[in-house]
Image (cartoon, rainbow, N blue to C red):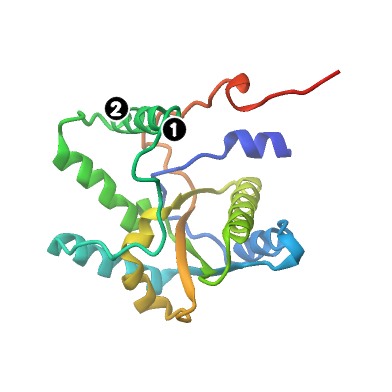
Amino acid sequence: MDVYEAVTSRRAVRGFTDQRVPREVLERVLSGAAWAPSGSNLQPWHAYVLTGVPLAELKKHAGERIAAGDPWDEPEYEQYPPALKPPYHERRSAFGHERYSALGIAREDWEARQRATSANWDCFGAPAALFCYIDRDLGPAQWADVGMYLQTVMLLLRTEGLHSCTQMAWAKYRKTVAEILSPPDELILFCGMSIGYEDATVGYTRTGRAPLDETITFVED
């Protein structure tokens, strides 16, 4: 698989089989991703990988919180601005419409939408998950470095025939994650990432991208 194919075939998969992901494959991917760029080589990512019993325990605890109707943990960073201006608001709305339409969920069916959302905290059935933290003393440039690291991980997963889904949703249950991982206090949970082999029986709609002239400006002779 070449780089172009890895990029264009990568997507947020929300349905995985329970096929085990070999430890040696995960180590190969993460060893390669360590070469992702970072300013002054700070390498600001701190990742934990869960499989087997620890991941099952995390899913169980998260599921218990969902069943009990526990409120989300207070945010440690802002996922989206309070008011998204155009064109970002329209893109986010279109994504939501496409996602729930693919699941056959009507816009007004709030209960069904909540059930679909709760699948985040089961990692969509994935047998492996990565949780990415960053030191709370670092700044926006280092958060960008973490994004480049995560993208590198996802592309290398594709070369191994694996899929993934990054999930900021896990930050909403960050205390539950911390009960399993016991991260140092100076770290903030940025996101989780479900990892595994795609369940091809789960339907989806591929989210499109804006035309090139909406996001790119060429300055030429």
Q: Is residue 27 above or below residue 160?
A: below
Write the residue at 72% across / 39% down.
Answer: 3
Mark 2 Cα shell of 10 Å, populated few (<14), some (14-19), many (≥20): some
Residue 220 placement, left or right of 116: right
List the residue tagged with mark 1. Answer: 88
What SS does tag 2 mark? helix
Asked which quadrant contains residue 66, the reply is bottom left
Disc 1 to disc 2, how far (Cα)? 20 Å
Marker disc for residue 206 = none
Q: Is residue 197 above or below residue 185?
A: above
Task: State the residue in front, 143 or 84.
Answer: 84
List the residue tagged with mark 2. Answer: 101
Task: State the residue in front, 96 or 17.
Answer: 96
Mark 1 Cα shell of 10 Å, populated few (<14), some (14-19), many (≥20): few
Which is nearer the N-term, disc 1 or disc 2? 1
Q: Please provide percent x and percent y for residue 117.
A: 28, 47
What SS does tag 1 mark? helix
Write the residue at 21% across / 46% down.
Answer: 115
| Residue type marked 1 | Tyr
Q: Is residue 61 above or below residue 208?
A: below
Task: State the residue in front, 72 or 181.
Answer: 72
Q: Please provide percent x and percent y for residue 77.
A: 41, 60
Numbered-mark total? 2
